[in-house]
Image: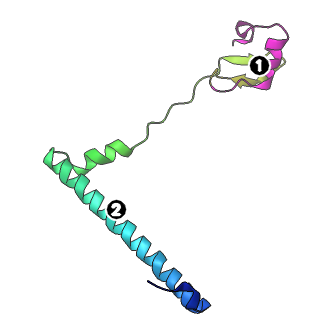
Amino acid sequence: MIDLETLSLKELKQLQKSVETAIANFKDRERRAALAEVEAFAREKGLAPGDLADLLTRRTRKPAAPKYANPEDASQTWTGRGRRPRWVLAALDAGKSLEDLAI
């Protein structure tokens, strides 16, 4: 075991660099081993590498059309998704309904 108290600053920094390199190399070896395992499993099941790549593609939502508009400023719209804008909350507090704000 290394006695850290007896090492100089230069030796400690060199040891730190060596440890960081060893950790990076370890993670790289583990990643390569995991990928090889996944590839072997995929081949065993008759899958091509492209089939696995399809799993990683993210599906994107197409933008939703606005459903509500601010009666005082028609440029302010809301799709009905997510948090209600302040103008919607103000209109609801003033006694209007969402149907009143519908486009």
Q: Nearer the viewer, residue 98 or 44?
A: 44
Crowd band around label 2 with a 10 angstrom C-alpha radius: few (<14), some (14–19), many (20+):
few
Q: Nearer the viewer, residue 12 or 5?
A: 5
Q: Indicate the secondary structure of the residue bearing disc 1.
A: helix
Q: CA distance from mark 1 to mark 2?
A: 49 Å
Q: Indicate the secondary structure of the residue bearing disc 2.
A: helix
Q: Which residue is drawn at the image coordinates 78% and 19% (left, top)?
A: 89
Q: Position of residue 26 (x, y in %)?
A: 37, 70
Residue that mark 1 sits on: 88
Please state if 8 lies on the left or on the right of 73 as rendered.
left
Please state if 33 lies on the left or on the right of 66 as rendered.
left
Q: Which residue is drawn at the image coordinates 58% and 87% (left, top)?
A: 5
Q: Which residue is drawn at the image coordinates 54% and 85% (left, top)?
A: 4
Range of the magenta residues?
A: 82-103
Task: Please count the marks in the image.
Answer: 2
Q: Amino acid at mark 1?
A: Val
